């Protein structure tokens, strides 16, 4: 490594960027807004480009200072500033958020962490979003985690549900506030099930005695384990069973059995869930679950997330 | 609440859910339905906030079939949806559950027809929305009752939403309420005041009670005066007939602006729950000092813009107030002695609704200022409701350069610019709340009565036979008397 990052220079460049962006708008000016620092650890060049696109989309709801760490072994450590601007609907003034992209190999994460400290937007929460599998496997990430008020991981990026879960639990035991986008992907399923039981005319769910979770693939994927754990916590007297099923890996169906009969949620065509049983038969569209939608949901929750924490145990 | 019995609830992540229900709109051929209700309902469907089975049953006299009515509503949605793309597929799914029943609101058989349709589409939860002329409110509620449509089965609900105005004075408000409550219990009566549904009015509560630094300064020790302005630059725009019966005091101050005042001045509720919040608003409204008749000329000023009497539908001798300003005092320990100046009007210089909280000046002026007026420029906190929602704080700062010269600067927070996402319209918020059963942002009868009690002495004075409403030039801030009202109290209107 031949170069180090100079935070003062980056902050100065960031200010110059604002002056320039303001001048480019022909006097209409830009507005800066910031509700948090979002540190994004991308796996490589391509991943960093995808991350930037997602950041651009989530900025509307969560204007942040984005600090993108692009992992690249063997490269010098370097940094450049960028801004994300957009024109609100019907607006006359652009809104911009600011960002810095740092390039570094994991070996230098300790130094990256030191550089990130002064670059964070002061007095606002910091979220560290680790996009790839590296966070689960490389100890270098331990240098970055202490910066975070919340760490967002995605366990779908690695194989081996039990190792992923063990790692997430270990972070939680170390006092970190964790989110896993694989859990976030289940919100649609969970919400559909919850809605069935919002109905006052529905039997009390504690009459449910067994739960069958069907998943694609040979072993239960982490989403199935999460779902089972969530149901198990909500219905402690019900017995949870996992079965394999035809189709893509992931959750295929969930069946709750009680004296009154079975209630099933199953994957249906067109991004829908089919709800059947106990007098119900309908399909309901699941909300979009692209990366930006998942991140938007997670960034809304900066405090404790008691439901997910209970699921982790 | 569903959460109590549902172990699967996750309020941090799940949207509050609207149960299967139908909305019956009386006055479905009218302006409000087309401009506000249908665009709001369509947007809620667009955002997937309504169940797929959500049904609308419209009623008015014009003879239309379901399909014609659907077409009219589609046109309205296309014309009046300001920031929602029109999606033909979504619309065709949404419109499948829109129905129309032609008939007169005074005709009992029309309610039988509505009941029959509700039965056919098997909706147990029903929201009746009175988007009609106010004179129908009582009668429609009674007819709903006579037809038994107010009776919900086990676990279901029947609710009624009433548009403002809630009566035209205290007595008529009480009489209307008796008629409504004879059919619906108070907790199923939703009196809509769309100001309370505005994101920025709700933000006042977040600003006051979500931050630690403002509330300690939010009282008579630090605040010198509060000014609430709701100005429109346009005139009555074809609604002259309606407006001349109402006037600015009734149309704006009695409801919207007193609700805003209550939001600015109320005590914190112990919990953010409908009745706890509404109790505090109601308590505040009851604490406003009622003017004695002889005080009215000193503390309230009407005005009429020059040219109002020539507007279509307006009586050439009309004495209606198109401008109203008043000084209110709140008789409690927090606010005793602090004047709340409230004004509203048509054909004023610009469209703007804002609350200006003026702090006491610094006790000593240590610094020279390039601005000789500086001592008269104390800190000012502006809560802007429209058009550019946000918050500004004016404070004094050193002028760059040699010497210790100071000048006022304004620090702005723009709500729309900080959060680029779209804010829901007031009607979207309020309709969802009514369907979910959350009445926090709705007005309760005791609040309605308290605010009528506040404005009634003014109304009486302005309606006395010899009283003439002063005229003002369009494009000015009302008649000069409005400024004099403040001058007598050693103050000035902002921007005046
Ligand atoms: N317009 C707004 O922007 C606005 C804003 C705030 C509050 N409000 C309040 O909202 C309410 C509705 O306002 P609006 O402007 O929509 O009213 P509107 O246009 O005057 O009336 C609504 C519709 O009611 C129907 N109608 C009249 N008499 C009827 C009868 N006897 N039986 C059945 N239908 C009848 C009429 O259609 P047919 O001719 O087909 O019967 C009319 O189009 C009012 O209370 C108003 O004060 C309105």
Image (tube, coloured by chain):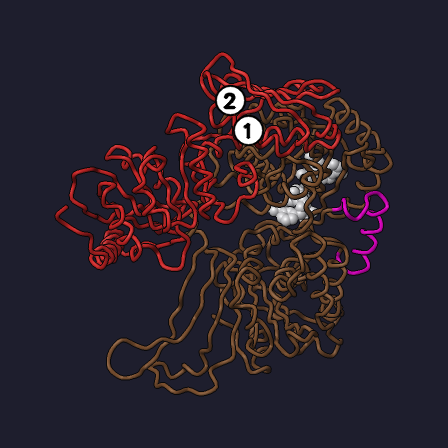
Q: Residue at x 48, y 86 (%)?
A: B363
Q: Which residues are magenta?
A: B168-189
Q: Is residue B429 left or right of residue A249?
A: right
Q: Which secondary structure class fits the magenta region best?
A: helix
Tell me the chain of label 1.
A
> Based on the displayed image, in which of its 4 quarters is residue B404 positioned?
bottom left
Q: Is residue B389 left or right of residue B11?
A: left
Q: Position of residue A182 (x, y in %)?
A: 45, 31
Q: Chain of mark 2?
A: A
A262 on left or right of B484:
right
- Which quarter of the rendered picture does the C terminus of chain A lie within? top right
Name the foreground residue: B276 vs B54.
B276
User: Tag 1: Cα neighbours inside 10 Å, few (<14), some, or many (≥20)?
Assistant: many
List the residue tagged with mark 1. Answer: A227
- Residue B182 lies within the magenta run: yes
> Compared to A234, does B214 lie above or below?
below
Q: Are marks 1 and 2 in contact (CB under 8 Å)?
A: yes
Vertical side of B232 occupied by B19: above or below: above
Chain B shade: brown
Ligand 1 sits in which quadrant?
top right
| Residue A285 percent location from the top left of the image | 54, 25
């Amino acid at each position: 490594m031949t170069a180090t990052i100079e935070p003062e220079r980056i902050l100065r460049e960031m200010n110059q960027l604002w002056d320039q962006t303001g001048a480019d708008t022909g006097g209409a000016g830009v507005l800066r807004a910031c509700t948090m620092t979002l540190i994004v650890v991308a796996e490589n060049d391509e991943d960093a480009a995808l991350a930037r696109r997602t950041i651009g989309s989530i900025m509307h709801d969560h204007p942040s200072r984005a600090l993108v760490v692009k992992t690249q072994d063997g490269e010098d450590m370097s940094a450049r500033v960028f801004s994300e601007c957009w024109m609100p609907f019907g607006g006359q003034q652009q809104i911009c958020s600011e960002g810095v992209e740092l390039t570094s190999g994991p070996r230098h994460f300790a130094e990256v962490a030191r550089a990130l400290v002064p670059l964070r937007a002061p007095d606002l929460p910091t979220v560290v979003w680790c996009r790839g599998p590296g966070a689960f496997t490389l100890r270098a990430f331990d240098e970055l985690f202490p910066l975070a008020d919340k760490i967002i991981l995605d366990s779908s990026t690695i194989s081996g549900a039990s190792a992923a879960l063990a790692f997430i639990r270990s972070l939680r035991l170390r006092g970190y506030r964790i989110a896993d986008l694989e859990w976030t992907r289940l919100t649609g399923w969970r919400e559909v099930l919850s809605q069935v039981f919002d109905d006052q005319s529905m039997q009390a769910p504690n009459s449910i005695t067994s739960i069958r979770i069907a998943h694609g693939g040979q072993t239960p994927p982490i989403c199935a384990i999460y779902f089972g754990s969530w149901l198990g916590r909500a219905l402690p007297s019900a017995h949870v069973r996992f079965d394999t099923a035809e189709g893509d890996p992931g959750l295929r169906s969930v069946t709750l059995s009680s004296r009154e009969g079975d209630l099933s949620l199953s994957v249906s065509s067109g991004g829908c869930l089919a709800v059947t049983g106990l007098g119900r038969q309908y399909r309901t569209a699941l909300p979009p679950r692209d990366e930006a939608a998942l991140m938007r949901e997670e960034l809304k929750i900066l405090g404790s997330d008691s439901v997910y924490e209970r699921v982790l145990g | 609440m569903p959460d109590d019995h549902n172990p699967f609830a996750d309020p941090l992540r799940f949207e509050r859910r609207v149960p299967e229900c139908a909305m019956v709109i009386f006055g479905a051929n009218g302006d409000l339905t087309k401009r506000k209700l249908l665009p709001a309902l369509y947007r809620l469907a667009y955002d997937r906030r309504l169940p797929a089975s959500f049904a609308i049953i419209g009623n008015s006299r014009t003879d239309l079939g379901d399909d014609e009515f659907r077409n009219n509503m589609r046109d309205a949605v296309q014309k009046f949806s300001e920031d929602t793309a029109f999606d033909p597929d979504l619309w065709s799914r949404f419109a499948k559950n829109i129905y129309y029943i032609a008939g007169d609101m005074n005709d009992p058989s029309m309610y039988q027809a509505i009941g029959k349709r509700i039965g056919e589409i098997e909706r147990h939860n029903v929201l009746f929305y009175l988007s009609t002329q106010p004179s129908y409110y009582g009668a429609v509620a009674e007819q709903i009752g006579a037809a038994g449509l107010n009776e919900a089965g086990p676990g279901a609900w029947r609710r009624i939403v009433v548009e403002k105005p809630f009566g035209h004075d205290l007595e008529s408000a009480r009489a209307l309420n008796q008629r409504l409550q004879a059919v619906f219990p108070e907790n199923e009566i939703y009196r809509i005041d769309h100001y309370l549904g505005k994101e920025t009015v709700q933000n006042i509560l977040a600003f006051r009670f979500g931050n630690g630094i403002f509330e300690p300064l939010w009282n008579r020790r630090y605040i010198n005066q509060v000014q609430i302005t709701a100005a429109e630059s346009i005139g009555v725009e074809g609604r002259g007939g309606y407006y001349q019966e109402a006037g600015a005091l009734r149309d704006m101050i009695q409801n919207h602006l007193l609700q805003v005042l209550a939001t600015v001045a109320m005590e914190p509720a112990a919990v953010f729950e409908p009745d706890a919040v509404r109790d505090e608003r109601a308590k505040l409204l009851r604490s406003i000092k009622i003017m004695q008749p002889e005080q009215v000329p000193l503390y309230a000023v009407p005005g009429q813009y020059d040219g109002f009497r020539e507007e279509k539908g307006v009586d050439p001798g009309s004495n209606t107030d198109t401008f109203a300003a008043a000084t209110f005092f709140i008789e409690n320990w927090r606010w005793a002695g602090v004047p709340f100046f409230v004004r509203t009007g048509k054909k004023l210089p610009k469209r703007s609704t804002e609350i200006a909280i003026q702090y006491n000046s610094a006790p000593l002026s240590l610094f020279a200022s390039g601005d000789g007026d500086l001592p008269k420029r104390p800190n000012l906190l502006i809560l802007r409701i429209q058009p550019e929602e946000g918050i500004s704080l004016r404070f004094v700062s050193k002028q760059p350069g040699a010497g210790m010269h100071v000048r006022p600067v304004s620090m702005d927070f723009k709500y729309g610019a900080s959060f680029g996402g779209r804010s829901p319209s007031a009607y979207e918020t309020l309709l969802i709340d009514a369907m979910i059963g959350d009445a926090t942002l709705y007005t309760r009868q005791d609040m309605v009565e308290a605010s009528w009690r506040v404005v009634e002495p003014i109304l009486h004075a302005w309606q006395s036979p010899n009283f003439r409403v002063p005229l003002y030039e369009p494009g000015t801030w009302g008649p000069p008397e409005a400024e004099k009202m403040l001058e007598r109290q050693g103050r000035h209107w902002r921007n005046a």
